[in-house]
Amino acid sequence: MLQTIETKITSSLKSSESLTVDSAVWYAEALLNYRKARADQWYESFEVQQYTYTLHLSDGLAGLGHLAALYNNMTTDINQSLMQMEGAENYLKLADLRLDSIQGNTAHLSMTGIFGLNLIAGLYLPFNAGDDWIWGTLGQYHGQPPAGKCNGTMVGISDASDQLQRKLNYPAVQYAEPYVFINLTVRNADGIMNYNERLYTGWNYPEQNCLTADTLNHYLLQSHMIINNYNEGLRPQGKEFSHVEIFDELLLGAMHFHRYEVTYGVRIPAGFDD
């Protein structure tokens, strides 16, 4: 039924069909969420905006032409709001349209738009509630067991830097065809020299500093942008991300930080003919 209504209100030939106000509100909200919202994705943060509309009525009913105008106005507002937000990975997560009042032949409506900022799960499975890990493990590459989760579990198995490294190297979205990399280049990055507060640094923090799931999602998103976007200055022109190693370091006996060694290369299909 939703697609039938969509066809009718987007057609250049509007029928004379009318709907009750409650039905019109339901269809407008459902169609906007169906076409524009990405409710099943994970985001770093959210923004809420409010909108108001009017819907013309005739004998207490809403015609399809007026419903089409309402839907177009809602869509335009959502698109304009997205254009004004910083970053490219922002989406409508949920729209809630409500009937506030009816005065004569006019229905007064209000809509709450909830926007997800900085899409995470489009590429990675996000850190969920309870995914709180110790920042890293000094000496891990010399045999020291990983520090584990903040609740004392997973000791000797993983830590925050290991979890970030795993997600960055194994995103949920990957190439379908087999491939190899040639002409490799290694670049270094950290949050001290060039990516302040975007990659983990812990000045005078305890060695067992805990990173919550929300904090780790922030570092995951920032890591992805730093590694993959040319304008960040790390990725060589003409090369693609191969893999990253994250080392847990200590500077001047007071600052713990993550140091990234990122390998790039030219990606070519595996098994190609010379």
Image (spheres, rainbow, N blue to C red):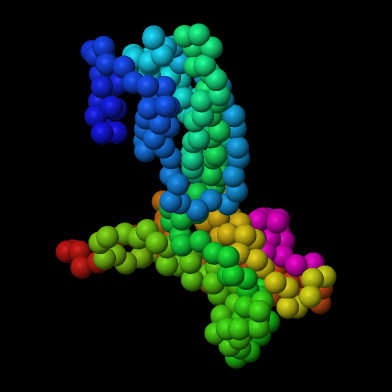
Let me know if residue 202 is in the magenta part.
yes
Name the residue at 49% across, 71% down.
Answer: 166
Let me know if residue 43 is in the magenta part.
no
Q: Position of residue 229 (x, y in %)?
A: 51, 49
Q: Is residue 201 above or below residue 95?
A: below
Q: Position of residue 96 (x, y in %)?
A: 50, 35
Judge left or right: residue 4 versus residue 64. Answer: left
Name the residue at 28% across, 27% down.
Answer: 5
Question: Residue furthest toward the front?
Answer: 59
Q: Which residues are magenta?
A: 189-203
Judge left or right: residue 23 versus residue 233. Answer: left
**Viewer can see residue 80:** no
**Viewer can see residue 128:** yes
Judge left or right: residue 189 versus residue 183. Answer: right
From the image, give the main secondary structure of the stretch colored magenta.
loop
Q: Position of residue 119 (x, y in %)?
A: 50, 49
Name the residue at 75% across, 67% down.
Answer: 202
Camera-side residue of 200 and 156: 156
Question: Residue furthest toward the left?
Answer: 273
Q: Is residue 1 above or below residue 42?
A: above
Camera-side residue of 211 and 29: 29
Question: Residue furthest toward the bottom?
Answer: 143
Camera-side residue of 206 and 212: 212
Camera-side residue of 207 and 245: 207
Q: What is the total number of numbered labels drawn onto the structure image? A: 0
Of the 4 image quadrants, the one containing the N terminus is top left
Of the 4 image quadrants, the one containing the C terminus is bottom left
Name the residue at 51% across, 61% down.
Answer: 126
Q: Position of residue 37 (x, y in %)?
A: 43, 40
